[in-house]
């Protein structure tokens, strides 16, 4: 692959890591941003302003931007800009494992974005990925403020490291369009309570875990494993690896 790669969401958790991987590979990469800055192009997915110029001449767009309630319309604007100014650019969209199985509103929105990508005139790739270690870390940090730490009963999770996800997305950006790529998931499927216990041990905290069985279709979708991809456990970094490498910023120094 030769040509410029544009990354939407390039200042976010995954986007930054993807940009770094692409630049390490020698790819000419720039970031779509609403604010000017080094190696950035100014464009706004919410209004469409600047998108035509941002995508003009690009070979690939890695679409990693996400903002709940704005994703579908923003992607439609991006697709329209590609149709006008870069009709053969490869559109690579980063989605989430389980968007078609767990009826979470945010997942439904991501699934609708997938449909926009599939229906575009652009050659496309869609990569679904499980939740990041950083998400579990943030969730557990919030829950640990309570005297009893609630966890979802009967629910497994399969988190993946951002670096593993970025490596896959960057590789796809350098390859020809592939349609729906195989899902990408973390190396371990374990109960949420197990991950919570590992987090508490790594952070030197003591909390009693409180399994909670929530009602409704969303909770049932998680209990049924709709967000998991055990057959695609291609991540290499475990949650314990992540915790060991990430300092606990909540502890006094």
Image: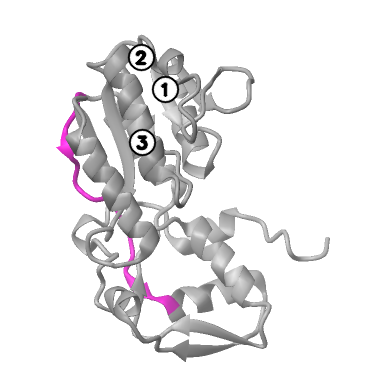
Q: Which residue is mark 1?
A: 6
The earlier-in-sequence mark between 1 and 3 is 1
Secondary element under disc 3, as helix, strand or loop, is helix
Q: Which residue is mark 2?
A: 58
Looking at the image, the residue that sits furthest to the right is 253
Q: CA distance from mark 1 to mark 3?
A: 14 Å
Judge whether 245 appears above or below 27 on screen: below
Marks 1 and 2, the one that precedes in the sequence: 1
Question: Which numbered dot is residue 82?
Answer: none
Q: Residue at x 68, y 78 (%)?
A: 145
Residue under pointer 3: 75
Mark 2–mark 3 Cα distance, whole angstroms, equals: 16 Å
SS class, disc 1 = strand
Is residue 251 something that shows in the picture? yes
Q: Is residue 249 above or below residue 94?
A: below
Decide which of 193, 106 is in the foreground and name it. Answer: 106
Q: Earlier in the sequence, mark 2 or mark 3?
A: 2
């Amino acid at each position: 692959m030769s040509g410029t790669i544009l990354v939407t969401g390039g200042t976010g958790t995954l986007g930054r890591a993807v940009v770094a991987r692409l630049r390490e590979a020698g790819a000419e990469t720039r970031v779509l941003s609403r604010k000017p800055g080094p190696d950035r192009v100014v464009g706004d997915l919410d209004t469409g302003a600047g998108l035509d110029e941002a995508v003009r001449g690009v070979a690939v767009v890695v679409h990693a931007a996400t903002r709940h309630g704005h994703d579908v319309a923003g992607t439609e604007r991006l697709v329209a800009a590609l149709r006008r100014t870069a009709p053969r650019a490869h559109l690579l969209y980063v989605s989430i494992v389980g968007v078609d199985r767990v009826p979470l509103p945010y997942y439904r929105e991501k699934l609708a974005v997938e449909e926009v990508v599939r229906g575009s005139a652009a050659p496309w790739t869609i990569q679904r990925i499980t939740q990041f270690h950083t998400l579990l870390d943030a969730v557990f940090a919030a829950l640990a403020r309570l005297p009893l730490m609630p966890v979802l009963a009967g629910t497994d999770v399969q988190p993946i490291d951002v670096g593993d996800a970025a490596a896959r997305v960057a590789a796809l950006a350098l390859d020809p369009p592939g349609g729906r790529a195989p899902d990408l998931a973390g190396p371990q499927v374990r109960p949420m309570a197990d991950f919570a216990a590992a987090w508490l041990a790594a952070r030197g905290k003591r909390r009693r875990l409180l399994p909670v069985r929530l009602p409704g279709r969303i909770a049932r979708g998680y209990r049924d494993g709709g967000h998991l991809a055990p057959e695609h456990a291609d991540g290499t970094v475990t949650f314990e690896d992540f915790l060991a490498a990430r300092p606990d910023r909540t502890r006094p120094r």
